């Protein structure tokens, strides 16, 4: 263990885990002690979801090196499939926690399948083309769920596509005890708010373990090599298509699990919540936190999710202030003198430290 | 007996077999190309390329700029798919294979314009070369099962051992992109060797090296051949290196082989001299 901690990468991972745990413990204690404002209380679970989103998108954008603009689409697939699973199992499994876990797993699996279906044709493309197709995928998913009607009764699930725009829940022909789960454009209604902050924390930790351990393994190195030099990666015998698809699907699955948790945090949820803006928002977290930098994504996601709330006192100028803060942060993080500041404050930090480890 | 076969080249009209060194004659060749050719649009970049490389041969591929030498390497590694002809690696046809599959069949290469994984450490670069030698799946990597630790330890040890060929162990933690030019070239060779090839293709390994570095490189190429018992084929403009270590040399001009033979034969071949220096005026 001592030997391991000497390695720089292992130390960074360790500090990332530690940071997340410490923040969770503090926030959980405050929550239990009823010392949080209502607005802060309501942000705990969404923050966890967006941290997972940022970490998972970092796998595609930062580690695999492919720009994906449809990440909210996978979140959407996860959210609605998770809601359907949680709602339809209400009678069978009374335990909230069990249903939440099942919903997250179902969300992850459905998003992974969606990721696979999209990934097989899309990953033949590169660069801008890949970005455009993923963007289109996000919009298509949004529109598809917009006309989805789902209900549940003793006979099982009733699913219908409202393509003509004239159908409604009545057309499902459910029995009297039937429950409407998704009502087309209205989205999911009457959802049980199963999501809890500890579950969000567990999900964040799980995704961190997956991404960080993956990067330090044979598979992760293969993915990184594709980002750095595709032709060289092929020349040393790496199956480029396989590893690109693998990274893409894992990333989609994690976005799906985040979506399921997110969906079960609100009593109503419409598919327009997962639009292009959400995809871009997550991309901003990743870029601002640093491509390939996991702890950077976490901090960026937390700060930038909380920031618009903190800026509420600016009223109409809220988004303007948000944009200004974004620009300032980008300027600051690209400034060599700003980056060098810590080493001036702590004189003993040597640049050659990495060589010895 | 063996000597007789070796001398066959002088009388047989197919010169491709003439340059296999004596010790490899009774083993099947590692590489056999016959009538290899590729067209780019209407231009035939490589025409009727025939070569046979022995198990432990150091073969040289030379020619003026634009002769199609790198194109031949790209054909052998399936970066380009040949328009005509066949390539047999260890007796197996490579038709329809991807570059990654060809690598697994035993061909590893370096690039003329260095292609390292610049943002990764030197050790990771070699470990990526070891990708198909380390065997565990993504799941045991994520869960860090015992197999992961065992294989990673092995990968670390082999990486260090391979780096020690060029005395580069101390650089293991550095970023590959930050290395000096010569070290980057050497790292590329190490990475190619990590894939456990039976034929190593070196595209201008001495480019940008000073004379003393080149001498060191020559020794190392021979050392690599002798320790790993593999065939090496190299493209090079440094004639001291080519004439010094290559047992068989193949000269390419305008996509066609114009001469084959030992260093001595090539040096005295009028066709080769003409290709490099131009035709001498009569009188």
Image: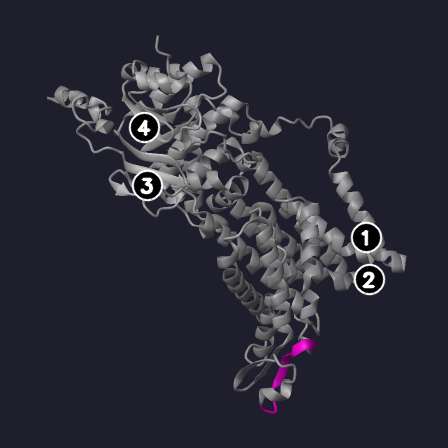
Q: CA distance from mark 1 to mark 2?
A: 22 Å
Residue, disc 1: A322
Instruction: Please state the chain letter of the residue tagged with numbered disc 1 in the rendered image.
Output: A
Crowd rating for badge 1 (residues with CA inside 10 Å; few <14, some 14–19, many 20+): some
Farthest-out residue, top: B283
The x and y percentages for residue B27 are 19, 31
Which of the two discs, 3 and 4, labels the residue nearer the N terminus?
Answer: 3
Q: Is label 1 on the same chain as label 4?
A: no
Q: CA distance from mark 3 to mark 1?
A: 55 Å
Q: Is label 1 on the same chain as label 2?
A: yes
Q: CA distance from mark 1 to mark 4?
A: 66 Å
Farthest-out residue, left: B1
SS under mark 2 = loop
Question: Residue A13 sits in which quadrant?
Answer: top right
Q: CA distance from mark 3 to mark 2?
A: 64 Å
Q: Residue at x 70, y 67 (%)?
A: A273
Quarter that holds the C terminus of chain A: top right
Which of the two discs, 1 and 2, labels the residue nearer the N terminus?
Answer: 2
Instruction: Please state the chain letter of the residue tagged with numbered disc 2 in the rendered image.
Output: A
Instruction: Please state the chain letter of the residue tagged with numbered disc 4 in the rendered image.
Output: B
Look at the image and say whether residue A178 sits in the magenta stretch: yes
Q: Which residues are magenta?
A: A175-186
SS under mark 1 = helix
Marker disc for residue B105? 3
| Left or right side of A304 for A211 | left
Residue, disc 4: B257
Marker disc for residue A232? none
The x and y percentages for residue B171 are 52, 25
């Amino acid at each position: 263990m001592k030997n391991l901690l000497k390695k720089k990468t292992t130390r960074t991972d360790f500090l990332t885990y530690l940071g997340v745990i410490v923040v969770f413990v503090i926030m959980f204690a405050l929550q239990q002690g009823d010392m949080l404002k209502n607005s802060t209380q309501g942000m705990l679970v969404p923050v966890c979801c967006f941290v997972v989103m940022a970490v998972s998108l970092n796998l595609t954008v930062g580690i695999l090196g492919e720009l994906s603009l449809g990440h909210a689409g996978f979140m959407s697939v996860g959210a609605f499939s998770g809601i359907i699973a949680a709602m339809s199992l209400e009678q069978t499994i009374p335990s909230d926690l069990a249903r939440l876990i099942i919903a997250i797993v179902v969300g992850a699996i459905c998003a992974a399948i969606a990721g696979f279906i999209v990934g097989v044709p899309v990953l033949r493309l590169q660069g801008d083309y890949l970005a455009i197709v993923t963007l289109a995928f996000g919009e298509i998913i949004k529109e598809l769920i917009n006309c989805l009607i789902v209900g549940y009764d003793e006979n099982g699930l009733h699913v219908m596509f409202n393509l003509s725009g004239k159908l409604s829940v009545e057309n499902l022909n459910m029995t009297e005890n039937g429950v409407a789960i998704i009502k087309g454009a209205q989205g999911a209604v009457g959802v049980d708010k199963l999501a809890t902050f500890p579950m969000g924390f567990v999900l964040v930790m799980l995704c961190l373990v997956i991404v960080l351990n993956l990067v330090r393994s044979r598979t992760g190195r293969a993915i990184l090599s594709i980002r750095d030099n595709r032709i060289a990666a092929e020349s040393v015998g790496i199956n480029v298509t396989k590893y690109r698809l693998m990274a893409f699907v894992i990333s989609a699955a994690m976005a799906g699990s985040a979506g399921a948790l997110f969906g079960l945090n609100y009593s109503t949820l419409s598919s327009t919540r997962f639009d292009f803006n959400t995809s871009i928002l997550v991309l901003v977290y990743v870029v601002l936190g640093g491509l390939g930098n996991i702890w950077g994504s976490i901090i960026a996601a937390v700060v930038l999710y909380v920031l618009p709330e903190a800026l509420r006192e600016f009223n109409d100028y809220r988004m303007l202030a948000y944009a200004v803060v974004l620009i300032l942060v980008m300027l600051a993080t690209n400034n060599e003198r700003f980056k060098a500041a810590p080493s001036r404050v702590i004189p003993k930090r040597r640049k050659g430290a990495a060589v010895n480890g | 007996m063996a000597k007789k076969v070796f001398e066959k080249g002088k009388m047989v009209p197919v010169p491709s077999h003439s340059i296999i060194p004596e010790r490899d004659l009774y083993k099947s060749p590692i590489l056999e190309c016959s009538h290899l050719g590729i067209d780019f649009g209407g231009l035939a970049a490589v025409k009727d390329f025939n070569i046979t490389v022995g198990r432990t041969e150091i073969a040289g591929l030379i020619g003026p700029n634009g002769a199609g030498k790198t194109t031949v390497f790209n054909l052998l590694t399936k970066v380009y798919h040949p328009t005509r002809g066949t390539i047999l690696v260890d007796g197996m046809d490579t038709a329809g294979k991807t570059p990654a599959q060809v690598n697994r069949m035993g061909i590893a290469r370096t690039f003329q314009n260095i292609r390292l994984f610049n943002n990764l450490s030197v050790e990771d670069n070699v470990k990526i070369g070891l990708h198909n030698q380390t065997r565990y799946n993504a799941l045991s990597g994520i869960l860090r099962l015992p197999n992961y630790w065992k294989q990673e330890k092995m990968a670390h040890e082999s990486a260090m051992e391979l780096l020690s060929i060029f005395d580069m162990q101390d650089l293991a933690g550095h970023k590959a992109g930050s290395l000096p030019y010569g070290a980057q070239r050497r790292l590329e060779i190490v990475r190619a060797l990590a894939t456990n090839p039976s034929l190593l293709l070196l595209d201008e390994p001495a480019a940008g090296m000073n004379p003393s570095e080149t001498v060191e490189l020559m020794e190392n190429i021979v050392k690599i051949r002798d320790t790993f018992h593999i065939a090496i084929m190299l493209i090079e403009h440094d004639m001291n290196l080519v004439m010094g270590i290559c047992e068989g040399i193949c000269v390419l001009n305008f996509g066609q082989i114009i001469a084959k033979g030992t260093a001595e034969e090539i040096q005295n071949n009028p066709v080769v001299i003409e290709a490099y220096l131009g035709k001498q005026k009569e009188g």
